[in-house]
Every structure is written in C-alpha cells, then in structure tokens.
Image (cartoon, helix red, strand yellow):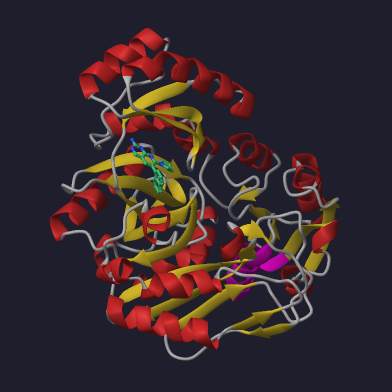
Amino acid sequence: MKKVLIANRGEIALRILRAARELGIRTVVAHSEADAESLPVLLADEAICVGPPSPTQSYLNIPNILSAAIVSGADAIHPGYGFLAENPTFAEMVREHGITFIGPTAENMRALGDKASARKIAREAGVPVVPGTDELQDPEEAKRAAAEIGYPVILKASAGGGGRGMRLVHTEEELERAVLQAQEEARAAFGNPAIYLEKYIEEPKHVEVQVLGDGERVIHLFERDCSIQRRHQKLLEEAPSTLPTEVRDGLLKSAVRLAEHIGYVSAGTLEFLVDREGNFYFIEMNTRIQVEHPVTEMVTGVDLVREQFLIAAGEPLRLKQEEIRASGHAIEVRVNAEDPDKNFRPSIGKVETLLWPGGAGVRVDSHLYAGYRIPSHYDSLLGKIIVWDLTRDAAIARMRRALEETALEGPGLKTTIPFHKKVLDNAFFRRGAVYTNFVARRMSE
Ligand code: MV4
C-alpha cells in the first residue's frame, strides 16, 4: 500500500492522515468545495476536489470519489465514519476497481447492515438478543409477540440503526396503528418498510465492544460506556465501563463470538444494552471506525486506525488477545458547534481564539485552527478532548482541568464545552449512575 485516498473530512480525515503518514503511506484527501481550506487538505500530500459542498454531491458521490482515487493513483481508500463508510455497494465497487477498501468486506456490511438480519446472526452465534421478533409480516404477528413478551415494546426499522426509525409502544390498543405507521415511515426514510419488535428495556446502560478481525480471528479491545447521549447523539464516552466483572466478561466473549461467526474483517463495534439486573443484549453492530475510538486507544495503547491499515494490507492480526490489556480510565468529550442553552442548536462562525489543553494524559483530535471558518454543510463536531488517568475519579478531575484550559472562541460561536463541565460536576455522573436517560433526566434543569 503506497497511497491512500481519504474519503472523509474533519477530525477523522486528520486522524487517518496521521496514521497513514506514520506508516509511510502517501495521502490524498478527497474534499468538497467547502473544505478546500480545511486542515486535512492543507496537511495532505495531495488534495482533490470531489464536488460542491452538499454531501450528496461530494462525500457521498461514488463516481466522483472513485474517479479521484483512480486519477490520483491511490491504491487504497479509507472511508472514515459516516458518508460511505458502511455502504456495501461502495466497498464492492472499490474492490472491483482493484483498490483496497480499508474496512470490512461488503459481505460483512450486508450481514449486519440490516438490523433484523444482525439479530438472526447473533442468535445463530449464541449471543443474547433482546426478546423480540424477526421481520414482522403484519400487526397480528406483532400483537401475538407483544402479548407474550409484555409491554412496553419497541418497533425498529430493519434498515435503521443508531436510534433512527424507532417507536415505543405501551399498550395493545396502540400497536396496530404503530406497526402500520412504522412500516410507512421506514419505507419513506430507508426505502425499506421492514420492521421488527423488541421488548423495551427501561433505563439500560449502553455499552459497546471494540473488536478487530482479520477474517480468521477476532480479538476484543474491551468496552466503552456510551450512555451519555442526547437524541441518539453521543456526547461523552468512557472506558472501561462500570459493569461488574462477570457481566463484562460475558459481554466481551459474546462480542468476539458474533464477530468471529461472520468472519469479520477490520475494526468494528458491537452495541449492547445492559439492564438493571446485569442482563446484556446485543442490539446492533457498527462496521466502521467510530468517533469514540480514542478512549479505547488510551486504555489499551493500540492504534486502531493503524491496525485497520495493516489488516487491509492483508497482514494477519498481529495482536493476540492475551497481549491486550486495559489499564486506567479514559474519557472523551465531543466538542460540537452547538448551543447547549438553545436546545443544542447548531452554531456556526469563524474560530478566532483557539487554545487546546495539553499536559499529562490529554489528547486532542481536532481539525480546527485559528482563523478556520466552520462550514455549515456538515455535522457539528469540532473536535474531541480525550483524557487518561489511573482511576475514573482522577480522569474526571483531569477532564475538568482540560476543559477549563480550553479557549475556543469566535463571533457567535457556541460549543458544548459548558455542558460537559456540568456533566463532570453532576453527582450521578460522578457515581457512575449513568443510564441512557441521563441527559433528559439529570441535565434538564
Ligand atoms: C432500545 C432501547 C430499549 N429497549 N431497544 C437507541 C439507539 C439504538 N442503537 C438502540 N436504541 C435503543 N434501543 C430496546 N429493546 C433503548 C434505546 C435507547 C438508547 C440506546 C442507546 C443509547 C441511548 C439510547 C437512548 C434512548 C433509547
């Protein structure tokens, strides 16, 4: 592998660029017109414009991205997260053009991209899933299942994921209409009306397992707790979780079993819900590198993006499970251009003052620079601050210090930093009493 096309933007484009450079691989950043002045473009060996600001015309434009790879002579493409990262058709087209896709196989993506299919695969592999159904044929089938499982139940779109296309149902009276509406919504949103039903787990923890696979062997790199989110957007992530050892061990074993069952290749994440009794249930798998991967890197010392490159280059996994140790505690906060006082409304502007934190145990992944104009066409992530320390309490204190040190200002620019300071001071958070309703329940004063 000599030259990689980075088919993404922002902090993850920079993250991939850094990993490539350390491996001696040349970098080409594919960018939209709106990102011509972005840091990854400025730092790359080469940059190539793939279209206008609108993502559908640039970062999602398969012919343009493929042409950019061919024209620049790239022999590999890294898709990052979002955009084309989990599109099996794209992965297949890359492969058919003789270019290495840095990520899972198209077959891996197809097996897990449909959530009802992922549930079936998990059951085959002996991994616990939430009590529920396969793809529903009609409201009657839903009624029979819900009567057996008990209310409340949740309807989910098979083509959804990450909280999109879900509907909570409390009683049998609501169910028929809900099924028909959910099918209609799924058809409109995803072009696929398939839905399935699950028992609704109240106040779960959201714990995800990081894995690496080479198609033969899978190892885990422990778990992350991602319960702190708002409207399915994660805000703060940490590793390890606060789960009891027996629960945690079961979860990690299950994750490896599932990923091995499908011959998973590259970095992936298996999401689980953990209920109050410590029962865990697989819900979905993300077949990409994730935003929050640095917390795992901080506790294990493994560079996940570098491993993605090596696996894609055809090298067998060089790490053995026994060699992976998690030590200490890491926390990541997402610094978004959003106003927490105005319902997290996106805020845009120019970065005038910029001072990121530093010192022992602090890492910053960000594409910002002083003078950077934040484009309005994309997600609001400005960067991530990640800290590591020996204990969770010490990591919280370190993150508080890091946030106090940060100066990120510009005319009209608001960020999620003040919100994060409040989370770090919250007594429930400090105790680890954090469930998926934390922001709604504990942070809406
Ligand atoms: C659930 C659930 C409760 N019961 N499934 C939301 C994101 C998607 N990955 C799955 N989600 C949920 N599925 C059952 N059967 C609650 C959620 C959920 C949630 C999950 C993870 C993180 C935050 C969440 C916030 C609300 C609901």
Q: Which of 76 and 394 is in front in this view?
A: 394
The answer to whether residue 15 of the structure is visible from this angle is yes
Residue sticking out furthest to the left: 246
Examine the image and state in which quarter residue 321 appears.
bottom left
Residue 199 is left or right of residue 271, and the answer is left
Quarter of the image that includes the N terminus = bottom right
Quarter of the image that includes the C terminus = bottom left
In this picture, is 147 found above or below 365? above
Total marks drawn? 0
In this picture, is 430 found above or below 171? below
In this picture, is 272 found above or below 427? above
Q: What residue is shown at x 16% (from left), y 47% (from top)?
A: 277
The percent coordinates of residue 281 (x first, y second) are 27, 40
Q: Main secondary structure of the magenta part?
A: helix
Q: What residue is shown at x 26% (from left), y 29% (from top)?
A: 131
Residue 39 is left or right of residue 37, and the answer is left
Q: Which of 223 and 45 is in front in this view?
A: 223
Q: Nearer the viewer, residue 263 or 33?
A: 33
Residue 252 is left or right of residue 71, and the answer is left
Highlighted magenta segment, given as a residue range: 10-27
The percent coordinates of residue 432 (x first, y second) are 27, 65
The answer to whether residue 303 of the structure is visible from this angle is no
The percent coordinates of residue 59 (x first, y second) are 73, 49
Quarter containing ligand 1?
top left
Examine the image and state in which quarter residue 379 appears.
bottom right
Q: What residue is shown at x 39% (from left), y 18% (from top)?
A: 175
Q: Is residue 14 magenta?
A: yes
In this picture, is 291 found above or below 65? below
Residue sticking out furthest to the front: 445
Q: Nearer the viewer, residue 139 or 303?
A: 139
The percent coordinates of residue 261 (x first, y second) are 33, 37
